[in-house]
Amino acid sequence: MAYAAGHPHRIAPHLRRLARDTWFRLRSHDHIAYYRRVMRSDTARDPEGAVGSHTHRRWLALGRTQFDYLVRHGLKPECRMLEIGCGNLRAGRLFIDYLHTGNYYGLDISPDILMAAQDTLVRYGLMDKLPHLTPVRDLRLEFLPSGFFDVVHAHSVFSHSPLEVIEECFAHVGRVMKPEAHFDFTFDRTEGREHQVLREDFYYRTETLVELAGRHGFTATFMADWEPLHKQSKLRLTRRPEA
Ligand SMILES: C[S@@+](CC[C@H](N)C(=O)[O-])C[C@H]1O[C@@H](n2cnc3c(N)ncnc32)[C@H](O)[C@@H]1O
């Protein structure tokens, strides 16, 4: 109520979103089905807005930020990369261009945003790089080979995921990573109580995700050099040798 009083112009859009999301939730059997409906609705309006960029300039800039960061952290053209929740290739188009042909694998739960991703490929003339773009219904990654990827990347995906979806990912992603690979993901960090808004935005304490990753054989590092670059925080998971 205090927030609403301070931001009266946000009340009407919030109520509209509340009505839409309640309708979607009632018609969905789980979070993935629900969020797929959210993405369908948002993508129909504007694919760049659907991945969170409200101007094209910001879409370009955030893709560049993700790309530059990983290159600074050792991404090489010969790496095999898995992007979880690749959206319409805001960063993916830069990874695809940079990596050797066929070395980029993008997954998403939303067929609609993957069709928008195909439009991005065409717009940027990346067809010859033969990226793999695959719709998924969960994050068990069963269709991917073991010990295959050098880098796994998920930007602004767990900020839209309940803990059980994140845990499913942690339980399975280690299998597809090479022993020395790393998995970078962003999350909405809170120092206070963990909470969610409309089952669309989820806020976690760092310790929760570090501890969960530890239970699945990972060491987690908080990436302090990412903090000035974006409002979400970033953790890097590496496999413990015995895992
Ligand atoms: C905010 S967008 C970010 C897209 C992309 N990572 C980027 O930075 O442009 C989040 C994306 O993650 C996808 N997504 C959400 N939950 C997912 C899940 N459990 N598995 C795979 N993709 C998911 C959404 O469909 C959406 O395309």
Image (spheres, rainbow, N blue to C red):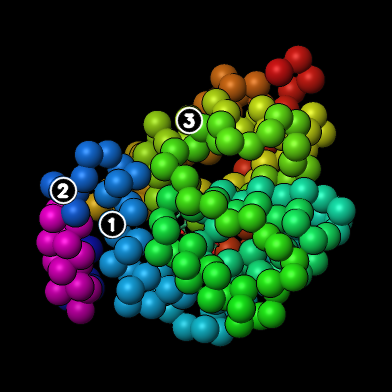
Please tell me whether residue 99 is drawn above or below residue 124 in the rendered image.
above
Q: Position of residue 106 (x, y in %)?
A: 60, 54
Residue 37 is tagged as: 1
The residue positioned 51% from the left and 32% from the top of the image is 140
Q: Residues within 10 Å of mark 2 (few under 14, many from 20)?
A: few
Magenta region, mostly helix, strand or loop?
helix
Q: Earlier in the sequence, mark 2 or mark 1?
A: 2
**Magenta stretch holds residue 158:** no
Q: Position of residue 60 (x, y in %)?
A: 60, 78
Q: Earlier in the sequence, mark 2 or mark 3?
A: 2
Q: In the rendered view, does 40 fall on the left or right side of 239?
A: left
The residue positioned 58% from the left and 36% from the top of the image is 143
Please tell me whether residue 216 is drawn above or below residue 101 in the rendered image.
above
Q: Considering the image in quadrants, where does the C terminus appear? A: top right
**Magenta stretch holds residue 16:** yes
Q: Residues within 10 Å of mark 3 (few under 14, many from 20)?
A: some
Q: Residue at label 3?
A: 168
Q: Residue furthest top?
A: 242
Q: Amino acid at mark 1?
A: Arg
Helix, strand or loop under label 3: helix
Q: Position of residue 184 (x, y in %)?
A: 65, 46
Whether residue 33 is visible to the viewer of this picture, yes or no, is yes
Q: Residue at label 2?
A: 27
CB contact under 8 Å: marks 2 and 1: yes
Q: Amino acid at mark 3?
A: Glu
Residue 47: name its quadrant: bottom left
Please tell me whether residue 109 is drawn above or below residue 58 in the rendered image.
above
Distance between the alpha carbons at the discs numbered 2 and 3: 23 Å
User: Magenta span covers which residues?
Assistant: 9-23
- Observer-side mark, 3 or 1, equals 1
